Amino acid sequence: MAHQDFYQTLGVSRTASADEIRKAYKKLAKENHPDAKPGDNSAAERFKAASAANEVLSDPEKRKAYDQFGENYKHFKPGGPHPHGGAGPIDLGDLFGQGDIDLSDLLGGAFGGGGRGRRSTWSGPRPQQGADMQSSIQITFETAANGVEYELRVKHASGTSVLTVKIPPGIRDQGVVRLAGQGQPGIAGGPPGDLLVTVNVAPHRYFQRDGSDLLLDVPITITEATLGAKIDVPTLNEGLVTVTIPPGAASGAKLRLRGKGFPDHRTKHNGDQLLTIKIVPPKNPSADVEILMKRLAELTQQEPRHGLWSE
């Protein structure tokens, strides 16, 4: 086989510095390494040729002999051990982050050669944790307050599995439950990733949530607001309870039912249920109602806006 000029192999001039030779070899080795291009025989040959060229040109004594004798440099016998000056051999760990690699072992293992030195210390890819997976579920407002065990079907690379997701009481909308070890498998023996389940809470038709408190608008009549009344209001878990509207209640006034809100994980107690009073006038009042309202207006001399906006 015709000898390949080592300088041409690395793509450098015959006057290239040791640093230029090192950089040229590093670039070629990284581009054509068997790990970077598995199964590519042409790349493997380029890697082998670049390694052979670098072995000679990076050593000052061998390079001197090669410059003088060309392909017959191998027959040059320097008088005594040669120094390892100049650029020196390149540690392939700098290229691939795999630790120390004996070059002769690597070439022998990659291309079928016998190898000259100790066994390679490279132990293959480093273990890595598998990727996390994402999923989402939707639960009712009541379920968010009380918690539940939810059966979730998950598709993995290895098939489909059914997992139990424990939804804690009091979870918020868009809260995330993490199932450790239920994500993608690890790489090279690494641990699997996690499954992150986003919980969407459906809105309630009349309750709203504010932190751990439960909010409810309570419509009452003008008469109930004026005279006071006992009325029934719903709660999330206890059905209807009776509350007292005090006489003279104003629209927007709030009543508090303690402990009837959502669980609060910080305080370990439930929040409260807040009732907001909404005075609702009669729709399409009859003639009799109009008469009574006019009479009420005559009897009620106090005008609520009196002095409210005066300076």
Image (spheres, rainbow, N blue to C red):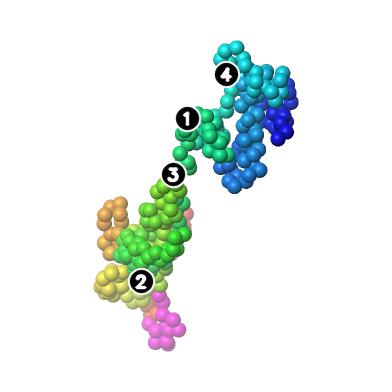
Q: Which residue is mark 1?
A: 118
Q: Is residue 239 visible?
A: yes
Q: CA distance from mark 4 to mark 3?
A: 35 Å
Please tell me which residue is depicted at 64% across the width and 42% down the height of the picture. Answer: 43
Q: Which residue is mark 2?
A: 218
Instruction: Name the mark on residue 127.
Output: 3
Residue 176, compared with residue 56, is above or below; it is below
Position of 21 compared to 221: left or right? Answer: right
In the rendered structure, which amino acid carries the disc numbered 3? Pro
Position of 94 compared to 174: left or right? Answer: right
Q: Earlier in the sequence, mark 2 or mark 3?
A: 3
Q: CA distance from mark 4 to mark 2?
A: 90 Å
Please tell me which residue is depicted at 46% across the width and 59% down the height of the picture. Answer: 157
- Callout 2: 10 Å neighbours few (<14), some, many (20+)? many
Q: Which residue is mark 4?
A: 84
Kindly indicate whether the residue at mark 1 contacts the one at mark 4 (C-beta within 8 angstroms).
no
Segment tinted magenta in the rendering: 278-292
Q: CA distance from mark 4 to mark 1?
A: 19 Å
In the rendered structure, which amino acid carries the disc numbered 2? Val
Tell which tag, 4 or 3, sits nearer the viewer: 4
Is residue 284 in the magenta section? yes
Position of 41 compared to 225: left or right? Answer: right
Closer to us: 290 or 258: 258
